[in-house]
Image (cartoon, grey):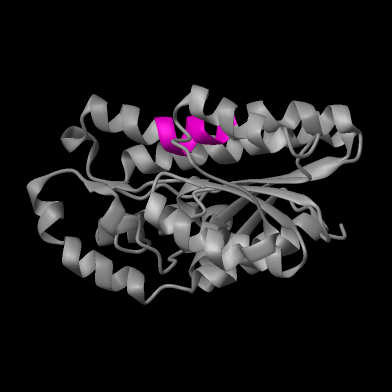
Amino acid sequence: MNLQDRVVVITGAGSGIGRATALLFAKHGARIAACDVDQARLDTLATELGDRKLVVRRVDVADRAQMSAFAGAVHATAPAADVVINNAGVGLGGNFLDTTLDDFDWIIGINLKGVIHGCHFFAPNMVEAKRGGHIVNISSILGIYGPPSVTAYAATKFAVRGFSESLRAELAPHHIGVTAICPGLINTAIIEDGRLSGAKLNKQKDKMVKTFKRGLAPEKVADAILAAVHTNPAVRTVGKDARVIATMQRLAPMALRRIGGWSKGKLVGV
């Protein structure tokens, strides 16, 4: 796909992977429709995008009315998006017994329903436009392997991967590709911006933040997303840790479970 003047929609674009992806696609000539819940981050992104900015709006992806209005603003300027990147997501660490139903509602609303909303409000126009395109949904290596202490997060990321694989089959006749991106440890603010359940885990927050600082740069994930739009894989891992874990899950799942049980979720991050 030649990205010059193509319409690229990115959720959670204010920081981390979303911001890096917005800037990368803009560099390749795309017009960017970006949303996030953090207005200050969005204001900075809008300045960075310059004339590549199409729509920049504060949106809670868990809110269907807000996502509908966002899509309406995009479609008022272009009949359909060419690429949709459902990136918005939050982290929630903690054992199942320490995780409340309110916690589950919060993370499912953003991590799973946010992806569903992005596809629901943009895919029909892509199909109707009959010019193909691509949808990228951000899952995680924890959408391939579920270690202890991330029950709710893993549930949402497994769901995103399964949803993406099914949607891929449905949209293939319309020449719309769908890829689930599964990164490993990435240097983002997901711990600072997320939630931790249980007093013991909260005491480890500073240590976890430092661990994430040693992760891959978000730009590496942006590169993988750009490559996925061109090559259309069903699932794409990002990072050596993600590749190793995905391989072990496929070839030696019992060994991986023993390692995961011993590490109590420290093998990979939230």
Question: Is 122 drawn above or below residue 58 in the view shown?
Answer: above
Q: Is residue 110 magenta?
A: yes
Q: Position of residue 125 (x, y in %)?
A: 78, 29
Q: Residue at x 78, y 39 (%)?
A: 78
Query: What is the quadrant of residue 205 in the picture?
Result: bottom left
Is residue 183 shown to the viewer in this render?
no
Residues 166 and 91: in front is 91
Q: Residue at x 12, y 44 (%)?
A: 198
Q: Is residue 111 magenta?
A: yes
Q: Is residue 245 left or right of residue 106?
A: right
Residues 199 and 5: in front is 5
Q: Position of residue 120 (x, y in %)?
A: 65, 26
Q: Which residues are magenta?
A: 109-117
Question: Is 12 drawn above or below residue 167 in the view shown?
Answer: below
Q: Position of residue 143 (x, y in %)?
A: 50, 46
Q: Is residue 103 left or right of residue 116?
A: left
Q: Is residue 76 left or right of residue 269?
A: right
What type of secondary structure mainly makes up the magenta span?
helix
Q: Position of residue 3 (x, y in %)?
A: 82, 59
Residues 5 and 178: in front is 5
Question: Is 175 drawn above or below residue 28 in the view shown?
Answer: above
Quadrant (top left, top right, bottom left, bottom right) of the C terminus: bottom left
